Image (cartoon, rainbow, N blue to C red):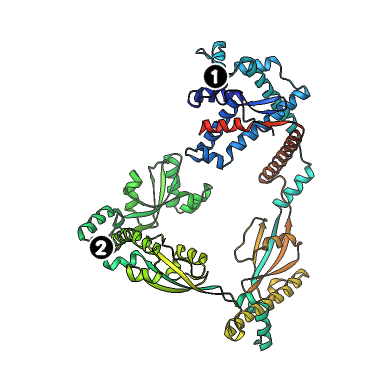
Amino acid sequence: MAREKKTKLGVWVILGLLFFSLVGFGTTSLSGRTTTLATVGDKEITLNQYALELRRGIDTFSGQIGQPLSFTQAQSLGIDQQVLNDMINMRLFENEATNMGVSIGDQRLRDRVTSNPNFQGFSGTFDREAYRDVLSRMGTRESDYEQSLRDEMAATALQIGLTAGYTVPAGYIDALVTYAAERRDITWVQVTNAALTDAIPAPTEEDLAAYHEGHPADFTTLETKSIVYAALTPDMLLPTIEVDEAALRDLYAQRTADYNSPERRLVERLGFADEASAQAAMDAITAGETDFDQLVEDRGLTLDDVDLGDVDQVQLAEAGAAVFAAASGDVVGPLPSLIGPSLFRINAVLEAESIPFEVAADELRAELGRDRARRVIGDAAEQMADLIAGGARVEDLADQTQMELGSIDWTVASTDGMAAYPEFRQAAAAAPIGAYPELIEMSDGGIFALRVETIQEPALQPLEDVLEDVTAAWTRDTTQAAILAKAEEMATALSNGSQFGEFGLAPTIDVDVTRQTFLDYTPEGYMTRVFETEAGNGFALPYDGGAVLARVDAVNAPNLEDPDVIALRDRFAAQLSNGVAQDAMQITLNTLRGETDINVVREAVNAVHAQIQ
């Protein structure tokens, strides 16, 4: 598919009208000497064209992200480079079209000009005076505009010819469809240590020594930093903060919705096109001919589609009184709703909740106390920073301020105490031995400073120190290896015609699984192995301390008449054809770039950027 040209002169006209008075670009306003920003063979890019297209690119991206984008931000995203690159690519095709003698007839050019709404008068038809006026305001002569438009149309025709008509061999597409849509019927089961006939023997000293030596990473200590710190958190100050009752009652009043909620219902709603359809459905439920779940399924919906969650009576409007008069499990209706006559099922009754001020007071007191403690810490932080700047140690901070002294043997696995704070973990990881303390703020408004006293490098722990862990790990791995060996024996037997029942196993049967199907309680790579295995064969994979045993019962080729498979085939064909066309486009562009003189006047580019900023 041909790539749409981004630097269309019709867009220049629109943007010229919108931005001419703001941007202030005339024929020589940027450089005072030249209007050329770049030449591509015999074609050129003018300063005005680049300026307007760059502005358009920035505005387009701003619209996509929903907020204005500054020029500096646009540059950091490479928008300016992309705009100039796209314009150069278009000029390459325009230049090549001229070299090849590709041309657009006068009538097509006339039709293009006269159909442009920017050149129409009040009557809605082409107006030559409007045409001249617009081009004049853009600083463009009619002959230049028409030649540029002719070049653009010829280049577009060349691009269409280059990318149209590519097809991918049907056999290749069929192979992809077969791969993607092929299905398997499988029978599988988890195998545990219950399948073992012999108990796992106790490990010998030689077994444990060999395991310890063969798995050093499992028994090596983490790097440990002995850290001394001074910290002050809102919770540390909380016992010293006094909060008056008036402030608590004001906050309680502000949070009344949090502490006093009306009676609510967990409700599902199924809408109908008209009252008669809704009543017929309700009559069928009353007669026991169907139920709410079946009605939802018959409509091709799920319970998630009809779930309203927990609602109060006001939210249900006219249906509220009837729904709230019903008991949990009832279906009521038809009742009016925003989606038309509906049936409502009540799944639970949530009683009204009212938490009095006296009960909520402690929680509110802690909240206000922490807020005030954060302000106290913020006010004191400057004094603490001054102490550090004056050479104070961590211990001095604890002596001279409200900060508390503490210590921790920290590793990357530490999460308790001060290590619960991500800011502390980050600082601890980065700090070398004896580094000058730095005051660091935490997410809860607290502050700390730390010093690393010593660093204990990772080391393999002696076997006698980790004997219990080594024994447990050896037993675990040896047991899994035995289970997997047993499962592989069973897989061989299954491949030779045995049945799962002969092993005393109760398997699960899944039919028509695809490569994208995910089955719970199966290991990573399981579905890949399923599709690598021929029908009638079994296999085993390790999983969760045991193994999974499976047999592929059938290989089901895709139904080529299935609408989903047809749609998949069409999608593959379109994607592959488009991919080939885009490859051809890129190869052509690379060739043209190598054969064409491209000169960019960097001073002119910088001048445009300076004006836009």
Residue at x 71% of width, y 16% of height: 105
Instruction: Tell me if I can see residue 359 in this picture.
Output: yes
The residue type indicated by label 1 comes to Asn
Q: Indicate which label's residue lies in the foreground, 1 or 2.
A: 1
The tag on residue 139 is none
Point out the residue furthest to the front here: 390
Residue at x 50% of width, y 41% of height: 65
Nearest the eye: 193 or 250 = 250
> Would residue 305 appear left or right of 252 to someone viewing this image?
right
Say what secondary structure mark 1 lies in. Answer: helix
- Ranked by sequence position, the earlier of labels 1 and 2 is 1
Instruction: Tell me if I can see residue 199 in this picture.
Output: no
Q: Where, by quadrant of the figure, is residue 402 drawn? A: bottom left
The residue type indicated by label 2 comes to Ala
- Relative image position of residue 5 (x, y in whole percent): 64, 30
Which class describes the residues within 10 Å of circle 2: few (<14), some (14-19), or many (20+)?
Answer: some
- Relative image position of residue 567 (x, y in whole percent): 67, 43
Residue named by callout 2: 361
- Relative image position of residue 328 (x, y in whole percent): 37, 58
Quarter holding the N terminus is: top right
Residue at x 68% of width, y 14% of height: 107
> Would residue 222 appear left or right of 443 to someone viewing this image?
right
Residue named by callout 1: 118
Q: Where, by quadrant of the figure, is residue 520 drawn? A: bottom right
